[in-house]
Image (cartoon, rainbow, N blue to C red):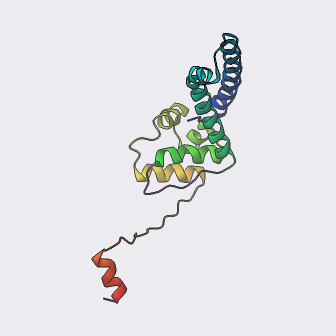
Amino acid sequence: MIRNEAEYQEALSRLEEERQRLDEHRTRLAGMGLDDEELKRALDPLRSFHLQLEEEVQSYERLKRGDIGELLNLHGLGHALVALRIARGLTQRELAARLGVHESQVSRDERNEYHGVTVERASRILDAMGVRLRSLFEQPILPNDPGDQQLAAGA
C-alpha cells in the first residue's frame, strides 16, 4: 500500500521504468521469433508485477480523491485509518503532531496497519483527523431462523 506522496512518486517512476522494460523485453523476445503464445508466457510474470504496481497507484489516487470505501465489522480498521489520513490530505508528520507523538510512531503504526489498535486509540486517531465514525448494526435475516419466524409472527 502506498502511504505517502514520496512513495506515490516513487511508484509512478517505477511504473514508467517497468513499462519501458516490458516493451524492451517484448521487442527482444519477438525478435527471437517467439510466437504470440510463447510471448504471452514469457511476459506474464513481468506483466503481473506491472499490473500490481498500477493497481497500487490507482488505489492511492482514489484515496486522494476521498474514495475510501466501507468498513464492515471493523475488519480492515488499520487500513481504513491509513486511507482516511491520505483522503484527508494529512501527512504522517501532521497526524503525529496532532496526536502528540513522533512521526516515526505514525510511520511504524501505518506500516503495520495499526495491528492490534484499541478502540480508544482508533477513536483518538479519528478525532485527530477530524473524522467521525458512524456505525449501524444490522442483523441479517437467515433462512429458517426460528427467531425470525417468531418476530414475523409478532411474538
**Residue at (69, 48) in percent of width and height:** 65
> What secondary structure is the stretch in magenta mostly built from?
loop
Quadrant housing the N terminus? top right
Residue located farthest toward the left when viewing the structure as drawn: 146
Residue 46 percent location from the top left of the image: 59, 23
- Vertically, is 127 above or below 60? below
Compared across the picture, whether 56 is left or right of 153 comes to right
Residue 93 visible: no
**Span of residues in magenta:** 69-75
Per the image, is 73 magenta?
yes
Residue 75 percent location from the top left of the image: 43, 51
- Vertically, is 141 above or below 77? below
Residue 50 percent location from the top left of the image: 62, 28
Q: Nearer the viewer, residue 151 or 87?
A: 151
Residue 103 percent location from the top left of the image: 55, 33
Compared across the picture, whether 113 is left or right of 42 comes to left
Residue 141 visible: yes
**Residue at (64, 45) in percent of width and height:** 63
**Residue at (66, 22) in percent of width and height:** 18
**Residue at (63, 29) in percent of width and height:** 7
Residue located farthest toward the top when viewing the structure as drawn: 32
Per the image, is 130 magenta?
no
Q: Nearer the viewer, residue 38 or 138?
A: 38
Number of numbered labels in the structure image = 0
Quadrant housing the C terminus? bottom left
